[in-house]
Image: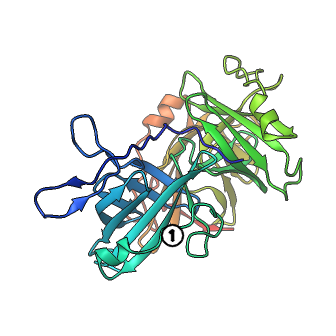
Amino acid sequence: MIRLLLPLLVACSTAPTDTGDTGEDTDTGGDTDTGEPAPIVVAGSWVDNWGGSHLVDSTSWQNDGSVYAITQYDNTMGYAIAQNGADNAWNPNLWSRFDWGWVEGELIYCQTAYAAATEGEAMGTPPADLSSPGSGCGGYSWSVLRAPFSLTDGWDDAWGGEHVIDAFSWQMGTSSYSISEVDEAGRWAVAQNGAANEWNPSAWSRFDWAWDADASLYYCQTAYAAATEAEALATPAADAADLGGGCGGFSWTELRPMLSINGAWLDGWGGDHDVNAFAWTSGTSRFDITTADDGAGWLVAQNAATNEWSPGLWSRFDWTWDGDGGLWYCQTAYAATTEAEAIATPAADATDPATTGCGSFSWSALTAE
């Protein structure tokens, strides 16, 4: 069973509402007690199981840059008719029909018509078959719509692992977990382990997450081998008041957003670099990241106590891309006495990284290893 905790959407039925200005009826499938048409019940911001985003209100359905101007909808029957936008990449100015419904509490939709010549032709398109969500959308499966997930992003963890999370899955390295239920307010999700996972394939997991006083994100895989979804759901939440030991006797794991320069790199001097959100490793030297601004292209890190040069002091790294997409970096500070001093170090000059700007030297080019 796949479920998502969503706001309850209620449809009510009345006669079509005469707009009075075009002579046409707009059937909303419901009205308010003020006599105004009821809003379309699928209004909101959504993501689908193909990675698309949707923004729906009573006048338009927007999907990844394409706009469909809704001319009529029926909440009871679960459909909307809309004209494709003139600037849409596909079938501009033609007409579409959207059908929607709920299966086991999950909202699904089908763009049943997408290139009808007229509004009437779109309206006359037979509705998608809600009784067959796997093939009732013109021979294809209906698409699932879920509310956006606050953890949607790519993340690094404190143990060197990588996580890619969206409303439908939690990918952890080579292991995948298909999310069936999520509670944003409760900060937990339940998911089925992938059949190809090395550990506990096809069993069920529960993930809890929390933020500490510094707004750092932590997670705990509270259950990882539950026999059923119900068992995973019944697993008690991890103790967010004890991030140091409240994850089944172990510490919770910190997550940080991946940096745009994550990866393994070679510099022009024969050095190798490995970068993630927690550390910049250069040869045998390690720099533990405490502050980063990925948009501005800099981070501050403490030099490891075992580094040959300036152990225990602080460094600042700046990076930039040139006009050809090449990546350059400068270790702008390497022996600051405090984190604050490293943060206050002026950024390197990115005007001409190939020639100058890193003190009196050029920046160093990085190429993917």
Kindly give the residue lying farthest to the front in the view shown: 15
The answer to whether residue 141 is left or right of residue 198 is left
Give the quarter of the figure containing the C terminus: bottom right
Q: Which residue appears at 80% of the width and 54% of the height?
A: 194
Question: Which residue is under mark 1?
Answer: 326
- Closer to the camera in the image, 271 or 248: 248
Task: Choose top left, top right, bottom left or bottom right for residue 80.
Answer: bottom left
Is the image coloured rainbow, by chain, by secondary structure, or in one colour?
rainbow
Query: Where is residue 247 drawn, in percent x and y?
Result: 77, 26
- Closer to the camera in the image, 343 or 71: 71
Q: Is residue 77 above or below residue 116?
A: above
Q: Secondary structure at mark 1?
A: loop
Mark 1 Cα shell of 10 Å, populated few (<14), some (14-19), many (≥20): few
Kindly give the residue lying farthest to the left in the view shown: 21
Q: Which residue appears at 68% of the width and 49% of the height?
A: 163
Q: Which residue appears at 72% of the width and 20% of the height?
A: 239
Q: Is residue 52 above or below residue 148?
A: below
Query: Where is residue 17 drawn, in percent x and y?
Result: 23, 52
Query: Where is residue 289 drawn, in percent x and y?
Result: 61, 39
Residue type pointed to by label 1: Gly
- Closer to the camera in the image, 14 or 261: 14
Q: Is residue 132 above or below residue 103?
A: below
The answer to whether residue 237 is left or right of residue 65 is right
Instruction: Kindly tell me whether residue 197 is visible in this rendering.
Output: yes
